[in-house]
Image (cartoon, rainbow, N blue to C red):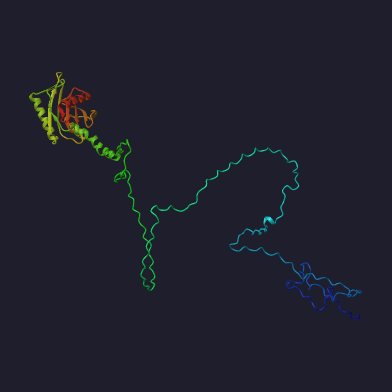
Amino acid sequence: MPEPQPEARPADGSTPGTEPEQDPAVADEPTSPPVPPDQPEPSDQPDPADQPEPPDQPEPTATAEVPAPRWSGSAPVPPPLPRRSVWGESAEPTPPPPVPVGPPEHQTPVDPWAGVDTGGWDLPSAELPPLPPTMSYPTPPDTRQWSGPPASPAGPHPAPPPAAPSAPRAVGPMVPARPVSPPAPQKMPKVPKQRRGRRSTAPPPTPPPGWQAPKGYVPVPVRRRRRWPWLLLLTLACCCGCPAYYGFPISAQYPARAALPVQVDDLSLRQDNRSTETAQTLENEVRKEHWLAEDTFAGVYSTTSGKLVTVFGGTGFRLSPESDAEAEISRLTARYALDAPESVDTGVRGRHERCAVGSADGSAVVVCTSVDHGSIATGVFTRLSVADSADLLATLRAQIVQPERG
């Protein structure tokens, strides 16, 4: 048998049996490398006892090198994480502090023209004219020194008499003085407000006593500027203009009186019994229909050619002449079998006229009625047109009805 040989030491010089202290971080890590999946497990490998030994294999000697451990004793340190900003801290980096600069008198002066060729800068300079001589200020006159106020002509003032000795006051206990309240602020008088358009009622300023007008001065009265009362004029125009516009026709047409003339142009008033009876019947009808009429009239006129004209009506105040004219035509429609009435322009403001064609006793007639604010007149015409009948009624009306204020 071979002799026992001394124990071999590792290459790092440590004593066998004592393991070197490892870093805790390294000690926790596994010391065996992972087994690849292709290698067989230890149970599948053959037992070394069953394998035949090699015949002449040399034994290991003490000089054999021990392999270096796979893992070192130090681990790499990761870089530090970036610092998180605190709430309220600015996200911009803090600028470095400025480098302190010493005062300028302790700094080394620098020549800005160092190394520059300045030999060719000698330029000819224009000579300036000499300055004019400076004028000197005049010497002030000598002043006398002030010798005090002049003496009074009446002589020196008498010295005041000596003051009488005052009786000693009794000294009592000191009483603290009460605080004096500040005086109340004086209220400024209120200036009365001046309304626009009103003159001030204050009297005019009077001259100071002893004042006299200069020679040749003639006082001229100040002419007051008149202001037209536009609002008053507008009110008068609205309140008086409108009633005057509508009231003028009434005042011109009412009151009125009526009288039948004997002759009107080529028309003559017939006064026979039959004509008189017809006129009386028509006048009674007018009084019955217009019970507010102040006066009534009726008559029958004829011409030499045989044309007959019957006219009747009355006087009195009428507020709505237009509606009264339409009502009169409607009343006579059944008696004369009138057609639709026509409106005729009279040319007079406040006067309205209606005409219609009908028949009486088998002959054609034209019935026209004219109404204004003071009277009503109706005519029945034979053998005339509507236009001629309207003109003839206007002529008869002008002769029969006479306004009292016309």
Q: Residue furthest top?
A: 304
Whether residue 329 is visible: no
Who's the residue at 21% across and 24% down the image? Answer: 391
Percent position of residue 161, x then y: 37, 62
Who's the residue at 8% across and 23% down the image? Answer: 272
Q: Residue furthest front?
A: 155
Q: Nearer the viewer, residue 400 or 342?
A: 400
Task: Name the quadrant containing residue 306.
Answer: top left
Q: Nearer the viewer, residue 179 or 74?
A: 179
In the image, taking residue 238 as reference, residue 40 lies left or right, namely: right
In the image, taking residue 353 as reference, residue 18 lies left or right, namely: right
In the image, taking residue 359 as reference, residue 12 lies left or right, namely: right
Whether residue 233 is visible: yes
Q: Nearer the viewer, residue 259 or 406?
A: 406
User: How many numbered marks are there?
Assistant: 0
Percent position of residue 77, x then y: 72, 67
